[in-house]
Image: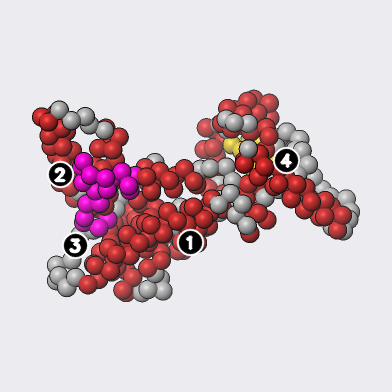
Amino acid sequence: MDLLLTLSLLLCFAACIWFLRAVLKPNPGPRRSANLPPGPNPLPVIGNILELGEKPHQSLAKLSKIYGPLMRLKLGTMTTVVVSSPEVARIVLQKYDQVFSSRTHADAIRALDHHKHSVAWIPADNQWRKIRKLCKEKMFSGQKLDGSQGLRREKLRDLRDYVNECCVSGQAVDIGVAAFTTTLNLMSATLFSVDFAAFGSGSSQEFKDVMSGIASIIGRPNFADCFPLLQLVDPQGIRRQTTFYFNKCFAIFDEIIRQRLQISDPTPKNDMLEALLEINQKDEAEFSFSDMKHLLLVSIISIDS
């Protein structure tokens, strides 16, 4: 009922805006037809939103059979181009990747200016290339992956030992939580040289709830994405909820960074944080603490995907 009321109010608000724009906008004269792919005719104000239905992936598959693998949809005030075949996707993502790289940001991603710092969302400029190169050299290079084999074996041994203990004691094993704890500790050890969770404790479940919460909120349909004017009021509270979860992660990162900076150990740790701090101390303007935390956030969020 609350969702229906919210939708009704939003539609009334959008209709008023559309009417005012239609009345006040001067007549531009004859316009050339936009060079857009084919698509269903949009309704006034809401466009093709209703055609997505409860299962958008199935609706888009049906529409692609009518309008082809490249089609246009009007979602509220936003014109959206949908690619629905591997062949066209390969052309878009490989041949014209630079053209399509700067995409529209979901309103949830704007929480704490994540869209301005995250390697997943910033344009493919010099800053993006620097961060991408940093990730490749410090996390995903062949040398780094080979060097972390021992760490991966250690975390798998921890998982094996925990399962053995549960078998001996007759305790049921939550496979999902156990696998998440292993992946979380592997990532946190790679980034910070610490374990974020322990088997059988509530810490891993708490962190999993945060990660699941972020993934759920970012993937939730948001009227503000279809009607950008609504971003001023965030009617569904999606950006506020995303900000809450991001702040919880940033509080953890701030504490870890603070502790690392206070350590006077002459032997540096061979982890991602040490590499980021080294770059930051050389030139904070090039790579700030904010950039660092947003990069760490992307790495941690990927655990639950």
Q: Which residue lies under the disc numbered 2? A: 154
Between disc 1 and disc 2, whose residue precedes? Answer: 1
Q: Mark 3 or mark 4: which comes first in sequence?
A: 4
Give the mark toward the camera: 1 or 4: 1
Residue at image position (15%, 37%) is 162
> Percent position (x, y) of residue 2?
62, 41
Direction from residue 75 to residue 30 in the image, left or right: right
In three-dimensional space, the C-alpha distance between marks 4 and 2, rounded to whole angstroms, equals 54 Å
Between the C-alphas of marks 3 and 4, the distance is 54 Å
- Image: magenta residue range: 191-208
**x and y, in percent, of residue 185 in the image:** 24, 48
**Other-residue count near label 3 (Cα within 10 Å), few / some / many at <14 / 14–19 / ≥20:** few
Q: Quadrant of residue 279?
A: bottom left
Asked if 168 appears above or below 14 in the picture, the reply is above
Q: Nearer the viewer, residue 226 or 128?
A: 226
* In magenta segment, residue 197: yes
Provide the residue designation for mark 4: 47
Instruction: Say whether marks 1 and 4 touch (CB < 8 Å).
Output: no
- Give the residue type that dot 2 points to: Glu
Residue 45 is tagged as: none
Residue at image x 68%, y 56%? 229
In the displayed structure image, the side of residue 142 where residue 165 appears, left or right? left
Badge 4 amino acid: Gly
Q: Is residue 24 left or right of residue 185?
A: right
Task: Name the residue type under label 1.
Answer: Leu
Label 3 near label 2: C-beta < 8 Å?
no
> Mark 3 is on which residue type?
Lys
The residue sitting at 51% across, 43% down in the picture is 219
Would you identify the image quadrant in which residue 157 lies? top left
Q: CA distance from mark 3 to mark 1?
A: 29 Å
The disc at residue 269 is 3
Q: Which mark is residue 112?
A: 1
